[in-house]
Image (cartoon, rainbow, N blue to C red):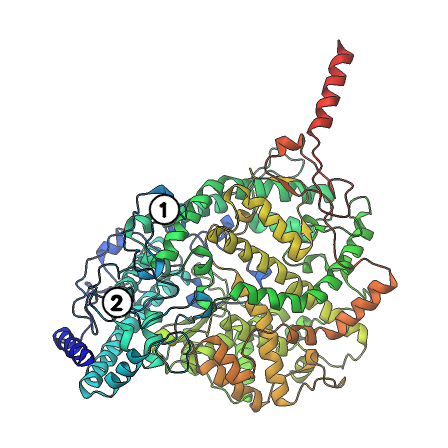
Amino acid sequence: MHSVLALGCLCLSLTLSFASPQLNLPTPQPEVFYNGYTPNVATTPAQLRADRDRDQRYGPPYSDAGRGGGIDDGLDDFRFGQTDDERMRIGYAYPSPRVNFSDSPFSGARFSNHNYGPISSTSTTDRNYGNDANLNGRYSDVPYSAQGERNLNPSDQYNYNNNPNVEFVGINNRNRFENPFLSNQDRFNLNQGYLERQRYQQDRRYQQELEKLRILLVESDQKGSLECTANVAAQWNFETNVNDFTQTEALNAQQRYVEFQRITAEQSKRVNKDLILDRRLYRQLMLQSEVGPNALPLDVLDRYNRLLNEMLFLYNSAGICAYQQPFQCDLHYIPQLKDIMAKSRDWDELQHTWVEYHRKAGRGMRDSYEQLIDVMQEVAYVNNVTNGGEYWYLAYESGNFRQDMDIVWEQIRPLYEGLHAYVRRKLRDYYGPDRINRIAPIPSHILGNMYGQSWSNVLDILIPYPGRKLIDVTPRMVEQGYTPQLMFQLAEEFFTSINMSAVGPEFYRNSIFEQPLDRRVLCEPSAWDFCNRHDFRVKICTDINQRSLISVHHEMAHIQYFLQYRHLPKIFRNGANPAFHQAVGDAIGLSVSTPRHLQTLGLLQRSLDESSYDINYLFTMAIDKVAFLPFALSLDNWRYDVFSGNANKRTMNCHYWNLREKYSGIKPPVLRSEKDFDPGAKYHIPANIPYIKYFFSTVLQFQIYRGLCRESGQYVPGDPRKPLHQCDIYRQPAAGNILKTLMSKGASQPWQEVLEETQREGRLDGTALREYFAPLEEWLRQENLRTNEYVGWNYDGDYCKRSIETAGLQVFGGYYNAATGQKSSVDLYPLILLIYLYFSLCLL
């Protein structure tokens, strides 16, 4: 009887709600006139009057490249290219029209079924946004999963605060995008409630309303694609013709698109998902409901954007004085400081550059970042997760994501420790044992990079076999008359040879491969999906060299990804998680960079079978990719800790260095304190852009590469004639068929399922990377044994204190005290006080 009444009420509300099966979403109809640059982009006179500075609002990539903010350290991140989706950092505070959502299907008093943890029936107090204690992570008793449900009718049998048939389990066991009513998911004890829902599914009227919901989603998808196309076209117009006019247009298009996403998400949240049994439909609605910070109340969203803009301004404007040149004080990270860190071998100059840049770029934004931590709690709340740390890993659909990544790191750590020991010895031989302890962490400023995340710039010091030159086919490319167009045609032929799609003439007609002479273009490599299923482009200022050849193949991999999932609804037209696009492109790069492939292209005349060439090749890969992993992991584990409250804001700088030492075996060149904010010197911190995707993609690329090579027979485990690092999948359709399957799924399934179905591995696995570098790992083991090198590192003194004043002095040098064993903290203040008293008495 209860089920019949419930169904009757449901159908009545649905009948009323479907008076017009259209989403009430804003579709601007401006007065159209064309700007003369990209004929498909329309503007209005109001857009031309916008007076907000895009540089200050958004930071990179919209800032001036010459100021150091527009380029970032992309080459250090292995980002040979990126999708336009990665470039869009949404979040904009401006008035939002109030919309009546009563027309939504499956609507009523209830919000969507966002239940990711236990719900207390007594927790029904409204949340107080004005309470500073709440903003500091101490909320009222309202459970995070009950937002929008606090006003439910107590008699509603689907009010989960009162429904005895629903028993919730913890967030760690829940994939937020899976339909909780699937029979194979042991997350709910539904008893008779589940049987009732099964009967609903079979009811004809229920099916009719479900079909209306599908129609509504189609309408939303079509409008979303049109809005996305207009926005991407405006961004393309700006980045390929940088001027005030196109900048204003791009800013306004971004505003409109963000507003459209906000309204669509609000409407999707109003859909009652309790009775939706279709897993794909459920996932589509859940993804459509996710808008990140844009779900914040407008006043809090404005605060969030102001904090980011303040920090990005400090980051972009940070300039220091040159070493021993106090009147030359206009050095910025790009290009001057980055160049100094890469090329200088003067210990004192490197230390000065490192210390001053971290002081100027990081220290001033500490207060703003502490406020951002509080706002991230708000972001987590409105996205229905427990805290900012959980929100940070939300896109990876795993309740144990941090622990999973630590497990992957433990798989890779033996290789890294062997590499670390060898590098420390070579640097010690160069700089002297008085500056580098044989069993201590490595000072970060001498690794050729401001952050110690890539060591390739000190290859001249580290290379295992200096007499064996590294492969460089650039001279042959110049001799053979390579052009940017020819390089892209070679990349296209690579993919067609493995049974993938040709890109078509429209791609070549619309893309930009070279810097135009008549206008300014932002030259960072990027791949663009115009959201209309046929217009895909690349923007890159191509050089004729080996690095650009690999970069071109990487960009074409993004285009192939767009082509393979273009049949999906727009919300699914993306990678399976934020790391997949990058991982696929890098996996193709691994194949293209092999000597075998370069021989096939006629760019390498002879085979290099000597093991010394192999070791040099693998070593150059390792000091980029393997050395990068602990940096990426420690950076976002640090953010997870501060966002979740595991790390106190008053000690967060020292916590950062503790993690750097734990994962990387890296320490700062001088003693740090809580007056400093060293993470802020990395662009992704003030911009609040996740970094864990680079860790994930670096590991995943080897996993995908191994699967492709194994399927094509180019890699046979245990066979020395077919090692993984020599595999080339060119002209191997079997590999291409796997890649097509992986790409064609887009984001329509959890990434674990995509890996399971295409690679037969349902989790991220570090063993593929170990297999790739196996010859180098064995060589490092033998070399460290030969030189009796200590593998690993011991804590050799304080790297950071709450206050340097309590230590009595600022300590410079390679290591800070004589401690080489257990962690210790030598308090020098009493000693300095005695010395001071002694000299005072002597003067008397």
Amino acid tagged 1: Asn
Up-down: is 251 above or below 720?
above
Under circle 1, the secondary element is helix
How dense is the environment of label 1, judged by Cα within 10 Å: few (below 14), some, or many (20 and up)?
A: some
Residue in front for this viewpoint, 548 or 528: 528
| Residue situated in front as seen by the camera: 489 or 97 | 97
In percent of width and height, residue 50 lies at: 28, 51
Circle 2 sits on which residue? Answer: 159
Left or right, 419 with reference to 521? right
Q: Residue 134 carries which label?
A: 1
Front-most of residues 732 and 53: 732
Q: Residue at x 51, y 66 (%)?
A: 400
The image position of residue 429, as x and y in percent, is 82, 52
Q: What residue type is labelled 2?
A: Asn
For image coordinates 87% across by 64% down, the residue present is 786
C-alpha span from label 1 to label 2: 26 Å
Quick check: can you spot residue 675? yes
Identify the image quadrant of the C terminus: top right
Residue 581 is marked as none
Q: In this view, does 5 lie above or below 713?
A: above
Which mark is first along the chain, 2 or 1?
1
Instruction: Determine which quarter of the picture holds residue 598.
Output: bottom right
Residue 674 shown left or right of residue 253 in the figure: right
Q: Is residue 522 left or right of residue 319?
A: left
Residue 47 image-quadrant placement = bottom left
Q: Position of residue 273 (x, y in %)?
A: 28, 73
Task: Give the foreground label among 1 and 2.
Answer: 2
- Residue 255 in the image: state x and y as whole percent: 30, 58
Mark 2: few/some/many CA within 10 Å (<14, 14-19, 20+)? some
The image quadrant where one finds the N terminus is bottom left
- Residue at (46%, 70%) from the top-left corner? 173
Task: Say if 266 sits above or below 510 in the image.
Answer: above
